[in-house]
Image (spheres, coloured by chain):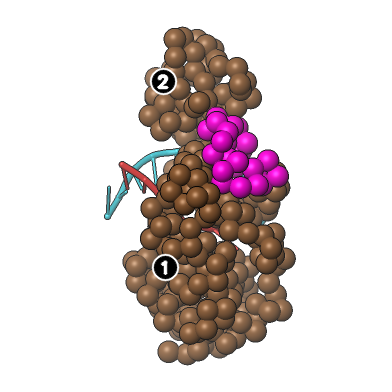
Chain colours: A brown, B cyan, C red
Amino acid sequence: MPDLATPLIAWYRENARDLPWRHPEFGAWGILVSEFMLQQTPVARVIPHLEAWLERWPTPSSLAADAPAEAVRQWANLGYPRRALWLYRAAVEIRDRHDGVVPRDVDALLALTGIGDYTARAVAVFAYGDRHPVVDTNTRRVLARAIDAKSQPEAPARRDLAAMDAILPRDDNEAAIVNAATMELGAVVCTARSPRCEACPVARVCGWRVAGYPDTGDDRRKQARYEGSDRQARGAVLKQLRDAAPQPIPFDEVIAQWPDAPQRDRAIDSLIADGLAEASDDVLRLPS
DNA sequence: AAATCGTGGAA
DNA sequence: TTTCCAAGATT
């Protein structure tokens, strides 16, 4: 297998974007918050929200001392609001089980609410400098193309974890750079649509390129339509709750003009089931 | 283990 | 206009 680490390190040194969480003094809590926000939300949308969040809650304990409703409200329109609730719960767990310090151990991180294989290792690597494979969707695409000669990832995520580990240098610091560089390459060069192979440091050894860009894979189901969906209804309810907070909203007035009444009721029920809303008497409110 | 979960910008 | 996609996690 060709050496990917060396060209990736050299490329990253010259081309890495200057992102807030890459500054050495950013801190483990800042990294953790950034990783929560970056789960399925683009970098450009995250940055201003991240800075506001950390200004308001500079530590896990400061967030844990507030109400979950405030976390959901501060999350604003970042999307997937369960992440706000999970981040809040993780802050409580960090306060209660880790003396308010973001854990360094991967298994301890995995035990926190809302943290999975990607986020746990991202924190251990980017906040603490330990050597672990960090595999996100960008990394998976780069590995699929460079190593498997596929246009899109097909291998199980578990296998990509091992594949990434096999690429990492022994040195902790260099391993962290290769993790970041692989993600960065997937984000800005080896993109899902119209990759910029002319700017790619590993183009010469890329299996997909060498094979003539075979279009295997790409059998992904297309994303469900958002307009008219239950998700849109949930979003509308939660936005109304956010805008009214701390005032609750009478049930009768919850997206009262919504064209599909059963869908509205499903949205309210599912938000309550998720812990993103609370019902009491005849009103609906953010979780206390 | 496939389905579900927001939102906005770019192609 | 519609479609695609974006540093995933959970059930």
Q: Does C1 sit above or below residue A187?
A: above
Percent across and percent down for residue A134 are 48, 68
- The image shows residue A63 at horizontal and vertical percentages of 58, 40
Q: Residue at x 60, y 17 (%)?
A: A247
Q: Which residues are magenta?
A: A53-79
* Viewer-closest of A257 and A121: A121
Mark 2 or 1 closer to N-term? 1
Q: Nearer the viewer, residue A3 or A178?
A: A178
Viewer-proximal residue, A233 or A54? A54
Residue A100 visible? yes
- Mark 1 Cα within 10 Å, few/some/many (few <14, many 20+)? many
Mark 2 is on which residue type? Asp
Q: Which residue is mark 2?
A: A265
Residue located farthest toward the front when viewing the structure as drawn: A99
Residue at image mark 1? A153
* Residue that appears at 57% across and 78% down: A173
Task: Say which residue appears at 55% left-offset and 31% top-offset.
Answer: A67
In the image, residue A21 above or below residue A242: below
Image position, residue A186 (x, y; %): 56, 69
Quadrant (top left, top right, bottom left, bottom right) of the N terminus of chain A: bottom left
